[in-house]
Image (cartoon, rainbow, N blue to C red):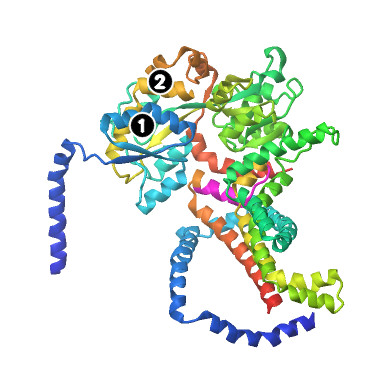
């Protein structure tokens, strides 16, 4: 532990000049800053203003102390974390196979990966209903083969939501990991092997650390996207799984209570930023 | 007073005088015709029926193209009006949201010199902001093959009776209608529903909760769940069951104790071409056009004469059909306007409680 921290301190000063030379002239940076300021900071500032309109914190009080909303925030994070981990475990081998496959096979693999990506999210969600339903394709096969006597409840519960969300989000995990794997110098693996490392330790000590930036980028993407998920959990959860985005939407569109909706959004945003910074710090430490 | 102040005052006075003189002159003739107006509706089959019945007639009569957008979204309406960038000339809107929008000052008043509601039921004739479009009903439906010999559930008390009528059920994921259904199942007479006894309703809902396979979210889902045999009975908006029946599904609509409500059209405050929006609404009140619309999608209009234009074989599917209307209960949108938000919060808590 002490050793690791010492490493960070020792290496930090070396990074700074590198960063500066990458940043380039200030003028070039100004444009993106203006762009982000207008399109992101300004709306977020307006959101913040809305949430404390009338100079009261009543909306925040309701969101943080009413039993419903904290519970839903908790559920939302639990689902987002589960989806992220599931996607990671599925995406890593997929990305590995794609990165080592011949160009033709890689193309076919990407086609399969992208095909659902180009399909409307609503269509995909309804497709899952057909596949996973009580009288759906999968249950008919299971019952027909005599593997189960009663149809299995795969839909309208948490597993259904997880299946649907992982399906939608998988490409976001595969692509960053895939591009990190492409950048790995395969000679390093050969060198490690030549020096007598077992294939397991080549993976753990050479390949995995080198692909970690991709893993972290994919994890951040999938985690933050799943925090805001709305239509998939609403439909595949059968109404039993409530994500915070559903409650925000209700306040915005059904009750026209924008102050409260803003307070909920600001809280979600703060949690997401916290998670993002935590991830970013780990990434920094690992790659430094 | 500074020179600029004087100038500003006299300019203002001049403007006021000019307006007083100019306005009647402008209003005497119609405002110039735009190339198009934008009508925001629920989309899907609804848009197709609206085009066949109303939009095409409007285009023919006035030579103004009707462009449609969807879905209906009270939040977007509010955003448009508050930012001053209103792209809709007319929009459909849910009954509770319409009243909220009126309360928050988001609507253009109806021009009652243009829109004639004399063919409508008396209690709707004094509308100032919300134009009653038509009615729909949340009704009980079931699979005929699940209950032999036409012995299906006939009331919400039957729906709650899982011994006599076994099988998974589906209801909408919303307190609207479900609180009313629970109270009627618990023996509250339909004319004594309001104000709703929310505690009693949730107590009764506890009993049915384990038997609900799915809490549906979208209209398309509600009927599809019965078609796919995910549930043997459920609630749905009447038109959704009709479409499934038309496509051959063995479903039965039970009109008894359905919750009937009106859907509405409004003109957003500050809408471009609001005058032509008013003209559009005026056209929608016409009985024969409402009849054409009902024949396509079984959502009848509120012009009472429109029933004369409805095909005989379709009348059984209309909530306003004299055989069906007395069996149903009118939703009290005012109660939901005042209590909807707190009822929804309690509903979400109740859904999450295991």
Q: Distance between the residues labelled 1 and 2?
A: 14 Å
| Closest to the observer, A59 or B228 | B228
The x and y percentages for residue A238 are 67, 39
| Closest to the observer, B351 or B89 | B89
Whether residue A249 is in magenta: the answer is yes
Residue B1 appears in the figure: no
Chain of the residue under label 2:
B
SS type, badge 2: helix
The x and y percentages for residue B286 are 34, 23
Badge 2 crowding class, 10 Å Cα cut-off, few under 14, some 14 to 19, many 20 or more, is many
Question: In screen coordinates, is B218 left or right of B46?
Answer: right
Which disc is residue B291 wearing?
2
- Residue under label 1: B55
The x and y percentages for residue B349 are 66, 45
- Location of residue A95 with respect to B279 vertically, above or below: below
Badge 1 crowding class, 10 Å Cα cut-off, few under 14, some 14 to 19, many 20 or more, is many
Name which residue lies at 38% across and 52% down: B82
Q: Sequence order check: which comes first, mark 1 or mark 2?
A: 1
Highlighted magenta segment, given as a residue range: A239-252
Magenta segment's dominant SS is helix
Q: Marks 1 and 2: which is nearer the front?
A: 1
């Amino acid at each position: 532990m002490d050793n690791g921290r010492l490493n960070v301190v020792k290496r930090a000063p070396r990074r700074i000049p590198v960063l500066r030379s990458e940043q380039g002239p200030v003028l070039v940076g100004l444009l993106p800053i203006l762009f982000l300021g207008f399109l992101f900071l300004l709306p977020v500032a307006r959101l913040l203003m809305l949430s404390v309109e009338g100079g009261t914190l009543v909306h925040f009080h309701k969101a943080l102390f009413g039993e419903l909303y904290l519970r839903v925030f908790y559920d939302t994070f639990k689902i987002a974390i589960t989806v992220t981990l599931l996607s990671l475990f599925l995406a890593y081998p997929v990305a590995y196979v794609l990165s080592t496959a011949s160009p033709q096979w890689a193309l076919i693999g990407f086609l399969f990966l992208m095909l659902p990506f180009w399909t409307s999210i609503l269509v995909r969600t309804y497709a899952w209903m057909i596949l996973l339903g009580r009288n759906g394709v999968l249950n008919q096969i299971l019952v027909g083969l005599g593997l189960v006597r009663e149809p299995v409840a795969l839909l309208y519960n948490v597993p259904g939501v997880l299946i649907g969300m992982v399906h939608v989000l998988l490409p976001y995990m595969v692509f960053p990991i895939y591009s990190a794997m492409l950048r790995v110098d395969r000679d390093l693996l050969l060198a490690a092997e030549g020096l007598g490392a077992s294939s397991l330790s080549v993976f753990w000590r050479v390949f995995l650390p080198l692909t970690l930036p991709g893993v972290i980028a994919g994890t951040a993407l999938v985690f933050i996207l799943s925090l805001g998920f709305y239509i998939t959990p609403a439909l595949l959860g059968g109404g039993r799984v409530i994500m915070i985005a559903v409650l925000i939407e209700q306040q915005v569109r059904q009750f026209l209570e924008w102050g409260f909706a803003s307070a909920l959004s600001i809280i979600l945003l703060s949690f997401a930023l916290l998670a993002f910074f935590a991830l970013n710090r780990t990434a920094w430490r690992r790659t430094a | 007073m500074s020179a600029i102040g004087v100038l500003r005052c006299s300019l203002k006075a001049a403007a006021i005088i000019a307006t007083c003189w100019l306005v009647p002159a402008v209003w005497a003739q119609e405002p110039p015709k735009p190339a198009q107006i934008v009508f925001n509706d629920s989309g899907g089959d609804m848009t197709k029926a609206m085009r066949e019945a109303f939009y095409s007639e409007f285009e023919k009569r006035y030579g103004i193209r009707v462009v449609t957008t969807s879905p209906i979204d009270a939040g977007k309406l509010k955003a448009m009006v508050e930012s001053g960038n209103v792209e809709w000339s007319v929009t459909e809107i849910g009954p509770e949201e319409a009243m909220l929008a009126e309360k928050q000052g988001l609507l253009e008043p109806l021009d009652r010199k243009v829109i004639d509601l004399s063919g409508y039921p008396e209690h709707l004739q004094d509308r100032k902001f919300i134009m009653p479009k038509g009615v729909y009903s949340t009704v009980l439906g079931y699979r005929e093959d699940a209950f032999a010999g036409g012995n299906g559930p006939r009331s919400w008390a039957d729906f709650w009776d899982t011994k006599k009528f076994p099988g998974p059920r589906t209801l909408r994921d919303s307190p609207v209608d479900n609180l009313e259904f629970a109270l009627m199942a618990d023996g509250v007479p339909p004319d004594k529903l309001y104000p709703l006894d929310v505690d009693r309703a949730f107590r009764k809902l506890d009993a049915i909760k384990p038997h609900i396979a799915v809490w549906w979210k979208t209209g398309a889902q509600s009927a599809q769940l019965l078609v796919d045999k995910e549930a043997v009975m459920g609630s749905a908006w009447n038109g959704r069951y009709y479409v499934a029946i038309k496509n051959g599904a063995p479903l039965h609509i039970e009109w008894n104790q359905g919750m009937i409500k009106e859907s509405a059209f409004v003109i957003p405050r500050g809408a471009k071409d609001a005058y032509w929006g008013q003209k559009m609404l005026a056209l929608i009140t016409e009985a024969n056009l409402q009849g054409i619309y009902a024949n396509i999608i079984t959502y009848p209009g509120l012009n009472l004469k429109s029933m004369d234009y409805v095909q005989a074989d379709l009348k059984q599917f209309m909530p306003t059909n004299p055989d069906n209307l007395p069996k149903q209960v009118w939703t009290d949108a005012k109660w939901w306007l005042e209590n909807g938000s707190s009822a929804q919060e309690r509903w979400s808590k109740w859904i999450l409680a295991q």
